[in-house]
């Protein structure tokens, strides 16, 4: 098992080894015996015994029966005690807020959604806190087991201050101190993360990727973003804002962007851009009153439904969008040389059928490595809630994931 993981502030070797053991048990799904943990982690039998004894006493793991493998005594299987630690994931989207309560395995125990109450930050944060309390109350689970709240928001973020800076479609938000405000309102620790990064963390936790794998996550929300996973770790960037691709040019003849260039992702690939293209082409009636998130969402759904129903003009608009998306993905995958591409986000399911039928061929044509390997393309296994689930997994990640920086002990 590759133990090179994300950075950490944990000061002791024992903490690192404990996380290695916890992750090995989590990834096994069915649980592991102590002998199997020795093989999976490379740790000594005595270290495994000492740490698993502590984890059992703390309730993080539990014994799950005995199994017989060859001669000798039956081996006791150890598995995560899923209810011992919980987390809440929140996805703040300009049209909708999604809330999930996760157990220690990342499984969703409770879920709720609510429309954005207004564009006013104070009202939105108050509604978030109320929804969190409702979620906890409905679950009837021990509040003390909740390790914290993870919030996935559109970028850019000021990670150090826990603020959201001018997110798209939330025009009154400027340096909103979301982390501290929600923490004060709920009494729970809050972690702020980009929606794209959260989605990639969710895929790491719930997907079947190898622990040291690499992939590009393409996030289709009200905006388009990406996240990169290398050697099993999400690349967050120096300011935690990696993955901003809005001003990469994918159509040199496309519309003019606010940055002064033409054909950027932001004005070509987003749901609003696709809806506007359909309106200009006469595929959709050009009578939309506003460009707010709800109206764009409704129009985009109408376009996708018509394409699915056999409307050739609607299909042509979506095929053009997929072609532009392929230009973006191809540029990134050729540069990064990753193992696979995963797509997801709130708008993904409506585009998934036409995208998965076209993208593999388009990407293969422009692949720099097609002579030596294929580039698998697939949708996320989680569904539209991927950012909310990922936000909760970011919180659990602090408990379970081994971090190589823990090996640098204080002098």
Image: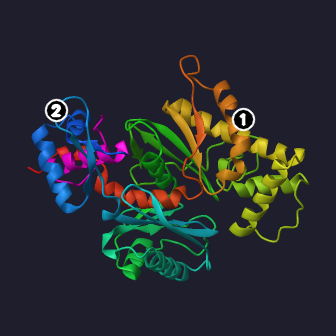
Q: Which of the 4 image quadrants contains residue 54?
A: bottom left
Q: Residue at x 54, y 78 (%)?
A: 124
Q: Which of the 4 image quadrants contains residue 325?
A: top right
Query: Looking at the image, is mark 2 or mark 1 earlier in the sequence?
Result: 2
Q: Is residue 251 visible?
A: no
Q: Which residue is mark 2?
A: 72
Q: Is residue 375 left or right of residue 184?
A: right
Q: Is residue 385 visible?
A: yes
| Residue 205 coordinates in the image, percent (x, y) | 42, 49
- Residue 36 numbered mark, or none: none
What is the crowding at mark 2: few (fewer than 14 residues within 10 Å), some, or many (at least 20)?
A: few
Q: Is residue 218 left or right of residue 201?
A: right
Q: Is residue 197 left or right of residue 326?
A: left
| Residue 195 coordinates in the image, percent (x, y) | 51, 58
- The foreground one among 308 and 295 is 308
- The foreground one among 179 and 231 is 231
In this picture the colour scheme is rainbow
Q: Residue at x 28, y 38 (%)?
A: 3
Q: Which residue is mark 1?
A: 358
- Could you tell me which secondary element the residue under label 1 belongs to? helix
From which residue to which does the magenta span run?
1-29
| Residue 337 coordinates in the image, percent (x, y) | 49, 30
């Amino acid at each position: 098992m590759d133990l090179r993981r994300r950075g950490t502030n944990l000061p002791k070797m024992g903490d690192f080894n404990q996380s290695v053991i916890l992750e090995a048990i989590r990834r096994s799904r069915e649980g592991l015996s102590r002998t199997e943990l020795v093989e999976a982690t490379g740790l000594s039998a005595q270290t495994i015994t000492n740490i698993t004894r502590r984890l059992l006493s703390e309730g993080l793991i539990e014994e799950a029966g005995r199994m017989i493998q060859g001669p000798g005594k039956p081996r006791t299987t150890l598995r995560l005690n899923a209810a011992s630690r919980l987390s809440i994931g929140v996805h703040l989207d300009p049209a909708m807020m999604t809330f999930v309560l996760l157990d220690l395995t990342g499984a969703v125990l409770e879920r709720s959604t609510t429309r954005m109450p207004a564009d006013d930050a104070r009202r939105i944060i108050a509604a978030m806190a109320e929804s969190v309390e409702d979620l906890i109350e409905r679950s009837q689970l021990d509040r003390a087991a909740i390790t914290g709240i993870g919030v996935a928001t559109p970028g850019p973020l000021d990670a150090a201050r826990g603020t959201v800076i001018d997110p798209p479609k939330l025009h009154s938000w400027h340096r909103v101190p979301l982390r501290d405000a929600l923490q004060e309102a709920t009494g729970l620790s809050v972690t702020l993360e980009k929606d794209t990064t959260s989605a990639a963390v969710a895929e790491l936790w719930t997907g079947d990727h190898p622990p040291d794998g690499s992939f590009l996550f393409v996030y289709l929300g009200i905006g388009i973003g990406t996240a990169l996973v290398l050697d099993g770790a999400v690349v967050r960037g120096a300011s935690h804002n990696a993955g901003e691709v809005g001003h990469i040019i994918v159509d040199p003849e496309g519309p003019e962007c606010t940055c002064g260039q033409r054909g950027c992702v932001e004005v070509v690939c987003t749901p609003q851009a696709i809806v506007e293209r359909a309106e200009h082409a006469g595929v959709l009636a050009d009578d939309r009153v506003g460009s707010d998130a709800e109206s764009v969402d409704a129009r985009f759904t109408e376009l996708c439904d018509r394409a699915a129903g056999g409307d050739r003009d609607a299909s042509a608009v979506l095929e053009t969008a997929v072609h532009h998306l392929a230009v973006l993905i191809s540029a990134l995958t050729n540069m990064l040389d990753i193992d696979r591409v995963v797509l997801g986000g709130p708008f993904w399911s409506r585009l998934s059928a036409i995208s998965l039928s076209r993208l593999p061929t388009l990407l293969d044509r422009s692949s720099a490595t097609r002579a030596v390997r294929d580039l698998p393309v697939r949708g996320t296994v989680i569904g539209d809630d991927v950012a909310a689930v990922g936000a909760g997994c970011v919180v659990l990640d602090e408990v379970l994931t081994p971090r190589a920086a823990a090996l640098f002990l204080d002098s």
